[in-house]
Image: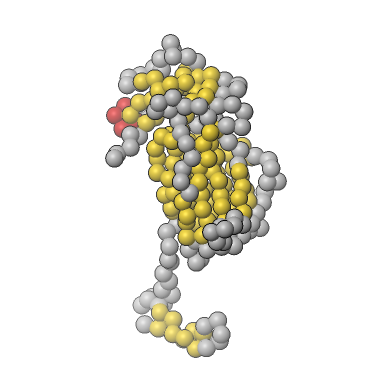
Amino acid sequence: MKIAGKDPNGNAKGVAVTENGEVKVQQTGSIVENVFQREIRNSNTNPVKLIKPVWAKGLTIVNEIYGVTGTFEVGEGISPWIFFIPNTTSILYKTNFTKRQNIGKQVIVIYPGHSNKPDDINIFLEGNTVLEVLNMPLYLDSITIQLDITGTFGVGEGFDCEVKAYWM
Amino acid sequence: MDVINYEYIETENKEIRPDGEGWECWGMRKTPTEEKAVWRRDADVYGEVTQ
């Protein structure tokens, strides 16, 4: 059944409701994206482009590192790269995060108006989790994520990790 | 290809084995500040690490 409503322009529109009077809504897009499945890596991944659901205002990216082998100098390790690419010839925004050399989680929160720390300082959460907050809007309809991995690895060594993204 | 659900634990060196069954030495993790032996086993077979 339908009840009377109005669209953003003020024109009369029918709104679908249930028998109990609850408005029927439908969410589009997936909340969780499996960006990089769990496996052992010792070199950069290919970039993966995520399409922003129309309702999303922010994104949380979690790089979970289960195990690590290899030799790392200062500044080496693993970190996500994030790109906002408006076209094939330019990169609108790109940021490098602190590289990790041990197990734990790298959590990156991108949300406009949300900043509980300066962008150049890490906040250490419970255990081996590091939080990075980007106070910025998702101003394009897509975002591209890549894992940057540096270090010296023997055969079969590397980072056993996976990356998931949660639209907010 | 199925991915093995490894669990990991570190010891001071390869001569020190973790307690429990199924551990294999995966290798070393060397950073400017520490050097550890890394051990792994199939968590689906041997269960999660409890410490």
| A20 lies above or below B31 | below
Residue at 61% x, 32% y is A75
For residue A164, side relative to residue B46 (left or right): right
For residue A158, side relative to residue A83 (left or right): left
Residue at 66% x, 51% y is A115
- Residue A59 seen from this side: yes
- The answer to which quarter of the image holds residue A157 is top left
Name the residue at the bottom extreme: A12
| A166 lies above or below A3 | above
Residue at 41% x, 69% y is A26
- The answer to which quarter of the image holds residue A15 is bottom left
Name the residue at the right extreme: A118
For residue A123, side relative to residue A32 (left or right): right
Q: Nearer the viewer, residue A5 or A38?
A: A38
Name the residue at the top extreme: B15
- Residue A106 appears at what percent x and percent y? 54, 40
Residue at 53% x, 33% y is A150
| A45 lies above or below A113 | above
Locate the N terminus of chain A and report the quarter of the image it occupies: bottom left
Total numbered labels? 0
- Residue A111 seen from this side: no
- Residue B2 appears at what percent x and percent y? 29, 39
- Residue A3 appears at what percent x and percent y? 43, 84
Q: Nearer the viewer, residue A143 or A121?
A: A143
Q: Nearer the viewer, residue A138 or A26?
A: A138
- Residue A161 appears at what percent x and percent y? 44, 37
